[in-house]
Amino acid sequence: MSQLPLRILSIDVLRAITMLLMIFVNDVAGVSHIPEWIKHTDANVDGLGFSDLIFPAFLFIVGLSLPFALANRKKKGDNVWQLIGYIALRSLALIVMGFFHVNLENYNQALALLPYPVYTLLVTLAFFLIWLDYAGDISRAKKYSFIALGIVLLAAMALLYKGGTAEDSQGLKPHWWGILGIIGWAYLVSALVFLLCRSSLLALMAAFTVFAAINVSSHLGLLKLHIPIVGDASSITLMLAGALLATLYTKTTGAGKSADFWFLTAFYGLLAFCFGMFIRPYAGGISKIYATPAWVFVCLGISILVFEFLIFLVDVKGKKDWFKWIKPAGTSTLTCYLIPYLLYALMGIVHFHYPHFLNTGVGGILRSVFISFLVIGIVAFLEKKKLRLKV
């Protein structure tokens, strides 16, 4: 069996591009009078906006990285139970962060002790204290003191949380799991399935087919049973597709077999896209909000083809330096995702407001581009100070 390399640079580049675009689309959502194609498409509209492509691409990338992360753990000597523990803790971290983030949407500062930006700042600071990568010269005593402080701070924020209305005050509750939470649950299932498949391409294909069938049958109304954690399996399908493609890469790039990889990857990308368009009229159209099969497979097909192009550009042609200016978004991705929460919270605390021309139209789009690169610049600075989150 082919040995997994420590890292595939094209995955880092794809992750960096996707993270850059995720920051952009999250920020531009607050800008008015922008082209419809940039926005998320409304839930009941059969269509695909540019913003609707970013999250499924990220799920696909998490799947691409999964085999390499587990292989690196094995090289460090982890046995199966240690790998399961690693998967569980990593999933738990994402689920907890997603849980707190989704409750920010329902936060009512009129009922709460803390203003919304202060609460957001303290929650995000707790995330950093708990999940900071403490590798380096720091002593174990200091490391666990900081982690304990973060846990106490997060627990305090849970107790101080007030949501809902004056007539119906609510504490923390899973309205939905948020972006990070969805990734966490999907990672838990996908990583355990990958372990069970033991890197067998045939077994992974079978697992992918099962979860894809769950997604399709759920939206066709054929599957009446709700499966806990799995749900309609849309996120798991995208993630397992990434793990499957990464495994395909390792099995077809040696011994003169690279031509097989280029053909099969292009074939699977086109097949996924065409299947998505085929199933579109029968299973709810293309809808990100409802995670319909058409949305899953159209986005999957696009993600596969973009990844194949980046393999050619970065790994074959060696053009990785073209993307060095966004490299931190690919190597400190979770940090990059959380920095906007700190940035927006600080803006709220000092009552900073953009001038009108930066909230609308072209000015607003340029603002969002600037914010995206500002965030990456901050993360680059933090990397130099060896400050990054790791789960």
Image: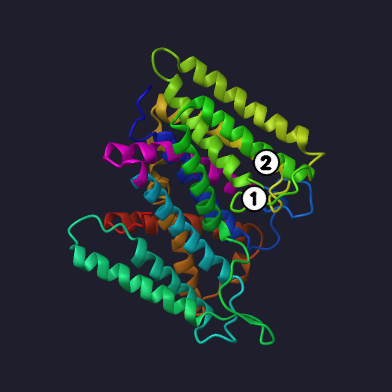
Mark 1 or mark 2, which has the lower sequence index? 2
Q: Position of residue 251 (x, y in %)?
A: 44, 22
The answer, for residue 123, to whether it is visible in the render is yes
The mark found on residue 227 in the picture is: 1
Quarter of the image holding residue 16?
A: top left
The mark found on residue 214 in the picture is: 2
The answer, for residue 305, to whether it is visible in the render is no
Is label 1 in contact with label 2 (beta carbons under 8 Å)? yes
Q: Nearer the viewer, residue 241 or 377?
A: 241
CA distance separating discs 1 and 2: 9 Å
Q: Residues within 10 Å of mark 2 (few under 14, many from 20)?
A: many
Instruction: Name the residue located 49 percent from the left edge and 49 percent from the top edge.
Output: 188
The image shows residue 182, relative to residue 113, as above or below, that is above
Image quarter of the C terminus: bottom left
Instruction: Name the residue located 27 percent from the left edge and 56 percent from the top edge.
Output: 386
Give the main secondary structure of the magenta stretch: helix
Give the structural element (helix, strand or loop) at label 1.
Answer: loop
Q: Position of residue 370 (x, y in %)?
A: 50, 57
Instruction: Name the residue located 52 percent from the left edge and 57 percent from the top edge.
Output: 180
Q: Position of residue 109 (x, y in %)?
A: 57, 83
78 drawn magenta: yes
Residue extending furthest top? 256
Which amino acid is tagged 2? Ile
The image shows residue 154, relative to residue 331, as above or below, that is below
The image shows residue 330, relative to residue 378, as above or below, that is above
Instruction: Name the residue located 50 percent from the left edge and 59 percent from the top edge.
Output: 95
Which amino acid is tagged 1? Ile
Q: Nearer the viewer, residue 211 or 26?
A: 211
Residue range (magenta): 52-81
Q: Nearer the viewer, residue 37 or 89?
A: 89
